[in-house]
Image (tube, rainbow, N blue to C red):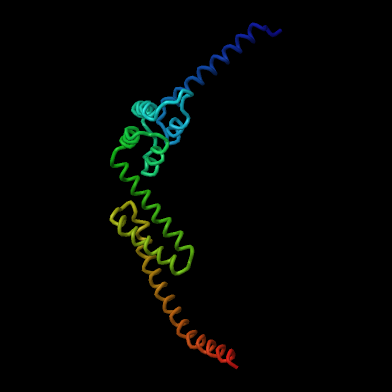
Amino acid sequence: MINPRNNCAIFLVVVFCSTVVFSQEKAKVDDAPLSYWTIRKKLVFRSPVRETDAEISAKIVTEVAARNVDFVITPEEEKSLAEIGATNELIVSIRNRVPKEKRVQTAQVREATLLYQRYVDHYARADLNSRRKAIEAGKEFIRLFCGDPEFKEQCDYFNLAVPKLEKWIEMMNQVNHKKTRFRGPFLQHQTIGANEEEFN
């Protein structure tokens, strides 16, 4: 026969263990580095008694100092936080949690990624104007990053692809020029014929 007291004891042990685990997990979350979106939520969703920008920013500065951050803030993110009330002190504290060398490296990777994507996007459109913009992006990538061994693979690609693309554009320009020379007299003849019909 099952003893109700034993069941009750088991239930209490389970509840206690669950509470301990939950408390430990919550402590981990509370101690974890702050993400960009966590900071945004703290600025947007304030206490019922509305805190000033300076007050809420000061609180977050304290949290940033205690918990650190898990991201490298971008100029765009700095501007976005300022628009929802972040003070300059808060933005600087977030920025300075990451060593300058890492901030520079992250900015380089971000800019290289944007240039590479710009090249890919314009190249995919296949018209002459877009291909010229692709060449510009490729040349800018070479100028900025081809002295860095980290970007060797991408630079090897651009050093081959850009000259080929320039030759393709030169060839297409010659083809279009020949078409224009061929069509010019033909269109002129058509126009003269049409004008003659108007007067007949």
* Image quadrant containing the N terminus: top right
Question: Where residue 133 sits: x, y (%)?
Answer: 40, 63
Q: Is residue 103 above or below residue 41?
A: below
Residue 67 visible? The answer is no
Q: Nearer the viewer, residue 132 or 48?
A: 48
Q: Is residue 68 left or right of residue 190?
A: left
Q: Quadrant of residue 104?
A: top left
Residue lying farthest to the bottom in this orientation = 200
Q: Nearer the viewer, residue 95 or 78?
A: 78
* Image quadrant containing the C terminus: bottom right
Q: What residue is at 46 percent from the left and 23 percent from the top?
A: 49
Q: Is residue 173 above or below residue 23?
A: below
Question: Where residue 100 sits: x, y (%)?
Answer: 28, 40
Question: Where residue 158 sits: x, y (%)?
Answer: 37, 62
Q: Quadrant of residue 50?
A: top left
Q: Is residue 90 above or below residue 12?
A: below
Q: Is residue 53 left or right of residue 2?
A: left
Q: Is residue 147 above or below residue 93?
A: below
Q: Nearer the viewer, residue 35 or 85?
A: 85
Question: Where residue 40 sits: x, y (%)?
Answer: 44, 34
Q: Is residue 11 left or right of residue 161?
A: right
Residue 33 visible? The answer is yes
